[in-house]
Amino acid sequence: MEIVIAQDAAAGARAVADEFEQVLRAGDGAVLGLATGSSPVAAYAELIRRHREEGLSFAGARAFLLDEYVGLPADHPQSYHRFIREQLVDHVDLDSSTVISPDGAAADPAEEAERYDAAIAAAGGVDLQILGIGVNGHIAFNEPGSSLASRTRVVALTRSTIEANARFFDRAEDVPRHALSQGLGTIREARRIVLTATGEQKAAAVAQLVEGAVSARWPATVLQLHPHVTVVVDEAAASRLELAEDYRAAR
Ligand code: GLP
């Protein structure tokens, strides 16, 4: 893993945006893996700025979202389908029809999960996947206990995730209890991964991700088995890394 301890939020956002810029400039038809949650938002804002001011183009790129709540239609204000359009897609030259997410309103969510995995494979796989991390070490909605080989599937959200995500809903009872999520095995197939985290509340999960044993207890640790992962954190999220000085020195 490459560990980037950014001096401030803006530097972190630039480091993440640099990864996207490399993939987008490498040629036509990049397949992007997009994430929701608050963590990637600053990087998306930086990408929008580069699009407007520096001519960075998303034309010809396609994208797959990591996950979606079960039971929310695409146009629901809290759907991830809508979130990614508001935070990124609507502000750059990425064709909205090529930004695919699992259909949370599908009549048969299990069948939808299989179809989604197949669609990613049919697109040739993801070139660059951006990830956040949950306080309990989840990536996408792969909660502790998820198989490290899991595929896209219906998952039950843990109480801690429901509580963490309640801030986006009027009432905690409104948070869906299930989601369609790319599996850890699916995410691992992305050719390149950048995970970003900020704030003290992520420090324990980041320490496990980078320095813990690979284990379903902390699902993000599966990324230690991937050959091309960059972890971009701020000082607070890096505060429990035992070897932070070594990571700084290595850059
Ligand atoms: C959510 C999402 C994840 C996200 C994580 C952290 O539940 N399913 O994709 O990485 O939790 O969210 P945030 O970035 O808002 O802290």
Image (spheres, rainbow, N blue to C red):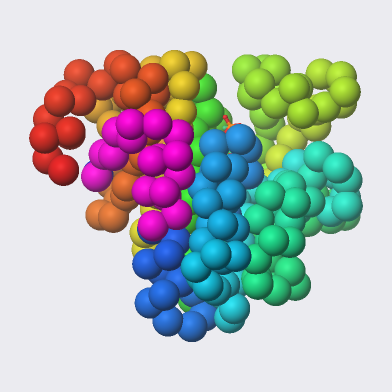
Quadrant of image for the N terminus: top left
> Residue 31 location in percent, x, y?
52, 70
Quadrant of image for the C terminus: top left
Depth check, front residue: 14 or 31: 14
Q: From this view, report whether residue 170 is shown above or below residue 109.
A: above
Q: Is residue 16 magenta-colored?
A: yes
Residue at (87, 19) in percent of width and height: 171
Residue at (66, 55) in percent of width and height: 88
Q: From this view, report whether residue 187 is shown above or below residue 23.
A: above
Is 164 left, or right, of 214 in this rendering? right
Residue at (15, 25) in percent of width and height: 245
On the image, which quarter does residue 37 sit in?
top right
> Residue 205 location in percent, x, y?
41, 23
- Judge whether residue 181 can be spotted in this image: no
Depth check, front residue: 172 or 113: 172
Q: From this view, report whether residue 162 is shown above or below residue 66.
A: above
- Judge whether residue 90 can be spotted in this image: yes
Depth check, front residue: 76 or 92: 92
Q: Is residue 200 magenta-colored?
A: no
> Residue 179 location in percent, x, y?
71, 40
Is 87 left, or right, of 188 in this rendering? right
Span colored in magenta: 2-18
> Residue 246 location in percent, x, y?
12, 30
Is 67 left, or right, of 39 in this rendering? right
Q: From this view, report whether residue 32 is shown above or below residue 14.
A: below
Residue at (34, 41) in percent of width and height: 231
Quarter of image, ligand 1: top right
